[in-house]
Image: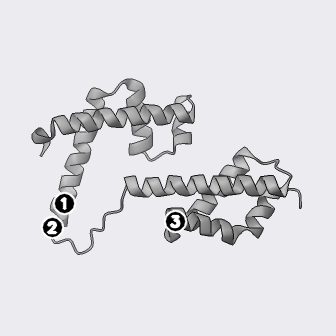
Amino acid sequence: MSTNAITDVFTVFRSRLRTLAARIAGDDEADDVLHDAFCRLWERHPTVEQETEALRLSTTVVKNAAIDAFRRKRSHPEVSLAGSEDMTAERQDCEDTYDTVLRLSRRALSESQLRIFTLHDVEGLSYGETAAACGITEANARVILSRARRIIRNMYIENRDCYE
């Protein structure tokens, strides 16, 4: 092993780690997952010396990054606009719904919920970046965001007839 076991493990076991990522997140996301996982490992575990520990950490981080990518893809599906005959009307409906959600969130959420919702769901920051910006833990950011989404969803469902 050279000076950094993480780099060596990622180099030697890259194809196996990519297969794991592809199985969970899909083949089109696998390379991005590996990149994200490697960056996470470098940030959090730069001094891992043993190959077995590096392999265990790498496998765990790749698996978690793949699950995150899968959830992100499932919760924010890509919509193909190609072939749509009435794209402007669909786009306007999406923009109207988006504006409605933002209005509801400004009205219903506390200041901290609104800030976390805006940073993560509107601006697209990761949970870690959102937590750092708000000075809280990542777990706390996830809980607050989950509660904020539930509040918005319930308000939207209750007032759906007014917005459609």
Mark 2 residue type: Asp
Q: Does residue 133 show up?
A: no
Earlier along the polypeptide chain: callout 3 or callout 2?
3
Which one is in front in this view, the residue at disc 1 or the one at disc 3? 3
Which disc number belongs to residue 156? none
Circles 1 and 3, Cβ within 8 Å, touching? The answer is no
Q: Mark 3: which amino acid? A: Glu
> Which residue corresponds to mark 2?
86
Q: Residue furthest bottom?
A: 83
Secondary structure, mark 2, is: loop
Crowding around mark 1 (Cα neighbors within 10 Å: few <14, some 14 to 19, many 20+) is few
Residue 118 location (% of width, % of height): 39, 38
Residue type, label 1: Glu
Q: Residue at x 73, y 63 (%)?
A: 10
| Neighbour tally class for label 3: few under 14, some 14-19, many 20 plus, Cα within 10 Å | some
The one nearer the camera, 63 or 104, is: 63
Residue found at x 17% / y 35%: 158
Q: Earlier in the sequence, mark 1 or mark 3?
A: 3
Q: Are marks 1 and 2 in contact (CB under 8 Å)?
A: yes
Figure check: 142 above or below 15: above
Marker disc for residue 29? 3
- Local packing at callout 2 (Cα closer than 10 Å; few below 14, some 14-19, many 20+) is few
Question: Farthest residue in the top direction?
Answer: 110
Distance of label 1 from label 3 (alpha carbons): 27 Å
Image coordinates of residue 96 in percent, x first then y, are 20, 48
Residue 57, position in %: x, y? 72, 52
Number of on-image labels: 3
Between tags 3 and 2, which lies in front?
3
Q: Which mark is residue 90?
A: 1
